C-alpha cells in the first residue's frame, strides 16, 4: 500500500509539473484589435510633428516626449498580431531616437525628414495588418 501511495504521489506531482510547464509555454494572450488599436492610435497621434518639435527642436519637448513614449510602450505589447510585433518595436525605437537625439543625426536616421518618413511607413504596415485582422479590407 505504501508503495502505491508513493507512486501515486510522484505521478500526481509529475502531472502537476507537466501542467505548469505547458501553461508557461503557452505564451501570453494577445489583445483584440479593438482593445489594442486605441492605445496604438493614441501613441502615434500624440507623437509631436516636426513642426511641434520646432526648428531647432525644443529639448524640453523632446525630453518630455521620450518619457511619454517609454511609459506608453509597455501598453503596446503584446500586439494583437505577431506580424506587427517587430514593426511596432521599430516604430517605438525610431520615435524614441528622434526625441532622444533631438534632432536625429545618426547613420540610421540621418535627418528629421527621414525619421518621420520611416515612422509613416511603419504606421502604414501596422494599418494594413489591422485591416486584414478586422476583415475590413
Image: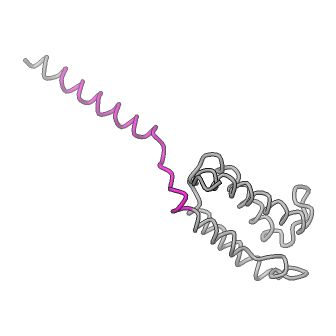
| Quarter of the image with the N terminus in it | top left
Compared with 85, 4 (above or below) is: above
Query: Which image quadrant is residue 107 in?
Result: bottom right
Query: Which image quadrant is residue 111 in?
Result: bottom right
The residue under the point 84% across, 73% down is: 102
Query: Which image quadrant is residue 59 in?
Result: bottom right
Q: State which region is magenta.
A: 7-36
- The secondary structure that most of the magenta stretch takes on is helix
The residue under the point 91% across, 65% down is: 105
Number of marks in picture: 0
Residue 117 position, x and y percent, is: 85, 63
Q: Is residue 23 magenta?
A: yes
Q: Is residue 65 magenta?
A: no
Compared with 59, 99 (above or below) is: above
| Quarter of the image with the C terminus in it | bottom right
Residue 15 position, x and y percent, is: 29, 29
**What colour scheme governs how the chains and residues are painted in the rendered image of this protein?**
one colour
Q: Could you tell whether 83 is left or right of 12 in the image?
A: right
Q: Which residue is at the front of the view, 121 or 52?
A: 121
The residue under the point 84% across, 81% down is: 51
Residue 62 position, x and y percent, is: 77, 77
Residue 82 position, x and y percent, is: 61, 46
Q: Which residue is at the front of the view, 20 or 52?
A: 52
Q: Could you tell whether 62 is left or right of 137 in the image?
A: right
The residue under the point 81% across, 68% down is: 98
Compared with 7, 68 (above or below) is: below
Amino acid at each position: 500500500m505504501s508503495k502505491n501511495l508513493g507512486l501515486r504521489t510522484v505521478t500526481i506531482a509529475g502531472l502537476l509539473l507537466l501542467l505548469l510547464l505547458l501553461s508557461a509555454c503557452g505564451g501570453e494572450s494577445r489583445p483584440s484589435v479593438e482593445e489594442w488599436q486605441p492605445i496604438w492610435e493614441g501613441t502615434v497621434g500624440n507623437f509631436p510633428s516636426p513642426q511641434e518639435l520646432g526648428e531647432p527642436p525644443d529639448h524640453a519637448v523632446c525630453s518630455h516626449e521620450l518619457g511619454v513614449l517609454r511609459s506608453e510602450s509597455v501598453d503596446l505589447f503584446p500586439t494583437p498580431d505577431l506580424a506587427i510585433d517587430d514593426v511596432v518595436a521599430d516604430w517605438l525605437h525610431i520615435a524614441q531616437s528622434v526625441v532622444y537625439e533631438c534632432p536625429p543625426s545618426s547613420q540610421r536616421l540621418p535627418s528629421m525628414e527621414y525619421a518621420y518618413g520611416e515612422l509613416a511607413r511603419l504606421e502604414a504596415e501596422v494599418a494594413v495588418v489591422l485591416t486584414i485582422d478586422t476583415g475590413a479590407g
